[in-house]
Image: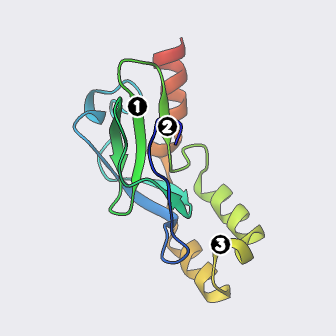
C-alpha cells in the first residue's frame, strides 16, 4: 500500500503453516536470496496478501496465492510476506496459543501442525540481509 499497491483479504483457505516459496529469476542473483534453492519451505500465516506489485518494486518470491517478497529496485529495501524470523518450533507454539484466531477447530490445528516442516533456508534470509547488505 505504501507504494500504491492493493492489499486483498482472504477469510478462508488462506496460507497457514509452512509453504513452499518459489523464486523469480531476479531472486537468483539478489544479495539476500543468493544461494537459496527454489521451492524452499517458509512459515506463512496470513489473511492479507498482494497479487500484484507496482513499479518500482520487483518480485523476488511467490506462491500460487500471493507475492511473498519484493525489493525496491536499486535500493536496499526488501519486504517479506512469509515469516523468515519464525522457525517450525515457534510456529507450533504461536499457532497453539492463537489457534482460535487462525484455525477452524482442533482437527484443523492438528493438520496444520502435523504438516509443518523445518525452515532453515527461510531462517537465514535475515542474516543474509545483515551480512550482505548492512555490513
Number of the label disc, if any, that sits on residue 71: 1
- Residue identifier under label 3: 102
Please give the name of the residue rendered at 63% of the width and 78% of the height, measured from the top-left corner.
103
Task: Give 134 or 67, whichever is nearer the viewer.
Answer: 67
> Mark 2, residues whose alpha carbon is within 10 Å: few (<14), some, or many (≥20)?
few
Q: Are marks 2 and 3 in contact (CB under 8 Å)?
A: no
Q: CA distance from mark 2 to mark 3?
A: 23 Å
Task: Give 1 or 45, whichever is nearer the viewer.
Answer: 1
**Residue 60 visible at all:** yes
Please give the name of the residue rendered at 32% of the width and 62% of the height, measured from the top-left corner.
64
Q: CA distance from mark 3 to mark 1?
A: 28 Å
> Mark 3, residues whose alpha carbon is within 10 Å: few (<14), some, or many (≥20)?
some
Against 39, is 71 above or below? above
Q: Secondary structure at mark 3?
A: helix
Number of the label disc, if any, that sits on residue 79: 2
Task: Give 54 or 132, whichever is nearer the viewer.
Answer: 54
Q: Secondary structure at mark 2?
A: strand
Against 111, is 77 above or below? above
Find residue 56 and report its horizontal and vertical position in percent: 35, 29
Q: Are marks 1 and 2 in contact (CB under 8 Å)?
A: yes
Find residue 98 and report its horizontal and vertical position in percent: 74, 69
Q: CA distance from mark 1 to mark 2?
A: 6 Å
1 or 2: tag closer to the N-terminus: 1
2 or 3: tag closer to the N-terminus: 2
Against 10, is 30 above or below? above
3 or 1: tag closer to the N-terminus: 1
Find residue 102 and report its horizontal and vertical position in percent: 65, 72
Find residue 100 and report its horizontal and vertical position in percent: 73, 77
Amino acid at each position: 500500500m505504501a507504494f500504491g499497491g492493493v492489499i486483498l483479504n482472504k477469510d478462508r483457505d488462506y496460507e497457514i503453516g509452512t509453504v513452499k516459496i518459489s523464486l523469480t529469476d531476479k531472486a537468483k542473483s539478489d544479495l539476500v536470496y543468493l544461494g537459496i534453492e527454489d521451492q524452499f519451505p517458509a512459515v506463512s500465516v496470513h489473511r492479507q496478501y498482494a497479487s500484484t506489485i507496482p513499479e518500482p518494486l520487483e518480485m523476488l518470491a511467490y506462491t500460487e496465492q500471493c507475492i511473498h517478497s519484493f525489493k525496491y529496485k536499486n535500493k536496499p529495501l526488501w519486504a517479506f510476506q512469509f515469516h523468515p524470523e519464525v522457525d517450525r518450533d515457534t510456529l507450533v507454539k504461536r499457532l497453539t496459543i492463537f489457534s482460535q484466531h487462525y484455525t477452524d477447530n482442533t482437527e484443523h490445528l492438528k493438520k496444520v501442525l502435523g504438516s509443518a516442516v523445518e525452515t532453515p533456508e527461510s531462517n537465514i534470509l535475515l542474516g543474509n540481509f545483515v551480512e550482505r547488505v548492512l555490513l
